[in-house]
Amino acid sequence: MKKLAITIFFETFILIMLGLVMVMTASSTYSIQQFSNVFYLFNSHFGKVIIGIVALITFSFIPYEIYKEYSKPFLILVTLLLVFILLFGNSVKGADRWVSIFGSTFQPAEIAKLALIIHLAKLLEEKGDLIKNFREGFSYLFFWVILISVLILLEPNISNGILLIFISLVILFVGGAKFTHIVSASFFTLISAGSVAMIFAHSRERIMSFISSMQNGSVLNFQVKQALYGLGSGGLAGVGIGHSSQSNLFLPESYGDFIFAILGEEMGFIGAVIVLLAFLFLFIAGLYIAKKTKDRFGQMLAFGISFSILTYALINASVAIGLIPTTGLPLPFISYGGTSMILMSISVGILVNIAVSNSIAQKGNNPSTDGLADESKFNNRRDGITL
């Protein structure tokens, strides 16, 4: 388990470093045009990478059990923060998703995602088999899912809200909830979230554009069209780091939500697949850690963290190739941005600590094999037998 924890740590570090390189190559032209400084966005991202790495290391040493005690107060605080952003948040592209405190801007939705996963893991441990009972178990956990998701949906941050519901329901199902309860909750949230999405112009436009593209076989939108050009021109091995054409202002915001297209153009199909396999490995490692963890809280927390990282990676890649409507969700550890980078790093730090803690616990529970050998040797000598 300790070796697996080290592997997860360094794999995450490599993904973060890859992201640093990709942000540099994807943002340089835009930085020159907008800020007359080729390193402007890179420097901004680099500072957040440093914070992310420090957070990754720090949370690797914090005992994960401590989060149980503070999960509910933390989630209540995040809920109040989400209410605050609805009232006073900064509007970006028609959505109030950002809040500024002391000059620092961040997305409370990213914090809410981790806070909810932690609290669900705690409640699944507390409720035990009661999770199978709708009124006394499932409904109580589902209340928190709906509360947090609705506040995120109303920002409006439709994609994050819907994805958080999906991740939460999967966690509840793995935690022992009945399949019928999951299906009923999924149907309810699908109808409700779909209705909310159609209310807001930007999300309605994305959905209708996607439906139209499915009907007539056209490309979803300009961004996806340019992303496909980039991925196609990358071929099998790519055009090389720093040689992307789409980053020269052909693909809007290529350093952010569509950075997977730049990655595929410069590193080719092979590079893109390797990156996706790296996210898959993180998920499989999380499953293994969850399986080996003795306490229920650690099991569900490890699963929730690893599953959320894989889900966000697959959603981002799916958007870039036009499989689903544009969501605005970043590629974990690689896309430009601060809140996602830092919160994902914290999440992996927690996952690493779960692995290390259980490795230490397993060693503590196993008697020393050397001691047994010495006792056996003594008994055999006493009987006149030499080993």
Image (tube, rainbow, N blue to C red):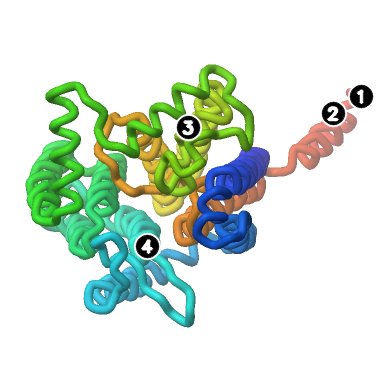
Q: Which residue is mark 2?
A: 380
Q: Residue at horizontal 19%, vertical 55%? A: 142
Q: Earlier in the sequence, mark 1 or mark 4?
A: 4
Mark 4 residue type: Ala
Give the mark nearer the N terminus: 2 vs 1: 2
Q: Regarding mark 2 in the picture, which secondary structure is present there? A: helix
CB contact under 8 Å: marks 1 and 4: no
Place of residue 253 in the rendered image (x, y in percent of width and height, measured from the top left)? 42, 48
Q: Quick one: label 4, few (<14), some, or many (20+) residues within 10 Å? A: many
Q: Secondary structure at mark 4?
A: helix
Q: What is the number of the mark on residue 115?
A: 4
Q: Earlier in the sequence, mark 4 or mark 3?
A: 4
Residue carrying label 3: 280
Residue at (50, 36) in percent of width and height? 262
Do the numbered discs 2 and 1 sit on residues whose CB atoms are within 8 Å?
yes
**Can residue 114 be seen by looking at this rendering?**
yes
